[in-house]
Amino acid sequence: MPTEKNVHVVEVKRNPKKENLPEDVAPIMDLLEEDLRGSKGKPRGTEWNNCGPYKQLGRNYYHCHLNRSYVAVWEIIKKNGVITCKVVYAGTRENVPTK
């Protein structure tokens, strides 16, 4: 039986700007959010392109290419056994935050 220390609740907080994604990209973002919940914020596998740490913003930030033009960036916050994945950016590669 799991103890409280190894039970994690994963919450994904959406960025309001995500709603401005094109029709063909928004469902991909939805899939990523679902994957973030199942992987504690660190999706793995061949279905995500260039997915990994995003050191330009700090050590708790990660990114993933949704397609050739769009990227998602999220922060993983761990507090009291709750893992929160806060999507801080979802948009074109040209406008990805670097600081």
Image (cartoon, rainbow, N blue to C red):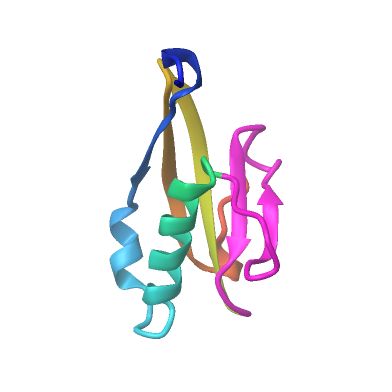
Q: Is residue 99 visible?
A: no
In the foreground, 79 or 92: 79
- Which residue is at a point 63% across and 80% down the rendered structure image? 68
- Look at the picture and state if 87 lies above or below 64: above
Name the dominant secondary structure of the magenta segment.
Answer: loop
State left or right for residue 70 relative to residue 25: right
Quadrant for the C terminus in the image: top right
**What is the total number of numbered labels drawn onto the structure image?**
0
> Is 57 included in the stretch rendered in magenta?
yes
Q: Residue furthest bottom?
A: 24
| Front-most of residues 73 and 37 | 37
**Left or right: 11 in relation to 91:** left
Report if residue 44 is visible in the image: yes
Residue at image coords 59%, 53%: 43
Percent of width and height locating residue 93: 60, 68
In the rendered image, the vertical position of residue 2 relative to residue 38, given as above or below? above
Residue 28 lies in the magenta stretch? no
Q: List x then y, in percent, for residue 70.
A: 54, 72
Q: Position of residue 35 (x, y in %)?
A: 48, 56
Indicate the position of residue 55 as horizontal and vertical percent values.
Answer: 71, 41
Q: Quadrant of the N terminus?
A: top left
Residues rendered magenta in the picture: 42-68
Name which quarter of the figure residue 22 lies in: bottom left
Picture residue at 34% right of the left edge, 84% below the top: 23
User: Viewer-proximal residue, 60 or 35?
Assistant: 35
Residue under the point 48% across and 14% down = 5
